[in-house]
Amino acid sequence: KAGVTQTPRYLIKTRGQQVTLSCSPISGHRSVSWYQQTPGQGLQFLFEYFSETQRNKGNFPGRFSGRQFSNSRSEMNVSTLELGDSALYLCASSPQDRSSYEQYFGPGTRLTVT
Amino acid sequence: SQQGEEDPQALSIQEGENATMNCSYKTSINNLQWYRQNSGRGLVHLILIRSNEREKHSGRLRVTLDTSKKSSSLLITASRAADTASYFCATSLRGAAGNKLTFGGGTRVLVKP
């Protein structure tokens, strides 16, 4: 099976702009989670989607949003970008919405905000 | 704040030696997982240990879990240069729905040939 794919892999945006990142999970996986990784805050949970419904949400401002489509592909959007949004954004997929399953991570999208 | 804290933050060993890293967490968990990350790339799942398990093995990896101390350890035996990476523990909180993981700060491991 193909792994989790994320597009684009690298992105440079200007403060104030918005950005959309895409994640395609492993075929058959219905749960998609998003994480932000920065040197200062480490890996932080953004949100999780299962069957097009948001199941969990982390402690991030409303500028961060996401959605999941019927084919389980997911997108996350960040509006009004700030310098502090520069990070590696990781997407993970899992077969079910129960934590007893391991998660499979994509290679990430590295976002730089200037 | 992060649920898990890892110790040490960095570790440098010679090829063939064992590497041990520890993870402590604060609240009751469903399970604890260990992941590896190479040079700011995606995370690779290594092992999952459930809250009712005390020890688990996978190849050269050995994980222990002590729920009374809220701690876990990852042992990599006979390390190789390819084991150079950052290692993260991640917990799934007891009673929480879904797949939310809370990660520790990670241990950077350098295996010198």
Image (tube, coloured by chain):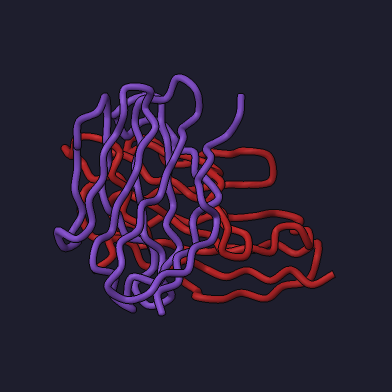
Chain colours: A purple, B red
Residue in front for this viewpoint, A79 or A110? A79
Residue in front for this viewpoint, A48 or B18? A48
Quarter-of-image position of residue A42: bottom left
Quadrant of the rendering where the C terminus of chain A is positioned: bottom left
Image-based side of A56 in relation to A104, left or right: left
Compared with residue B106, is residue A49 higher up or lower down, i.e. above or below? above
Q: Which residue is drawn at 29% across and 29% down?
A: A98
Quadrant of the rendering where the N terminus of chain A is positioned: top right
Residue in front for this viewpoint, A43 or B27? A43
Compared with residue B11, is residue A26 higher up or lower down, i.e. above or below? above
Q: Residue at x 40, y 74 (%)?
A: A113
Residue B6 can be seen in this image? no
Quarter-of-image position of residue A80: bottom left
Quarter-of-image position of residue B113: bottom right
Q: Which residue is drawn at 41% across and 64% down?
A: A37
The image position of residue A100, as x and y in percent, is 35, 31
The image position of residue B30, as x and y in percent, is 28, 39
Question: In the orientation shown, which residue stands out farthest toward the top?
Answer: A28
Image-based side of B50 in relation to B110, left or right: left
**Numbered disc total:** 0
Residue A64 can be seen in this image? yes
The image position of residue B63, as x and y in percent, is 52, 47
Compared with residue B77, is residue A33 higher up or lower down, i.e. above or below? above
Compared with residue B35, is residue A25 higher up or lower down, i.e. above or below? above
The image position of residue A49, as x and y in percent, is 27, 35
Q: Which residue is drawn at 36% across and 60% down?
A: A36
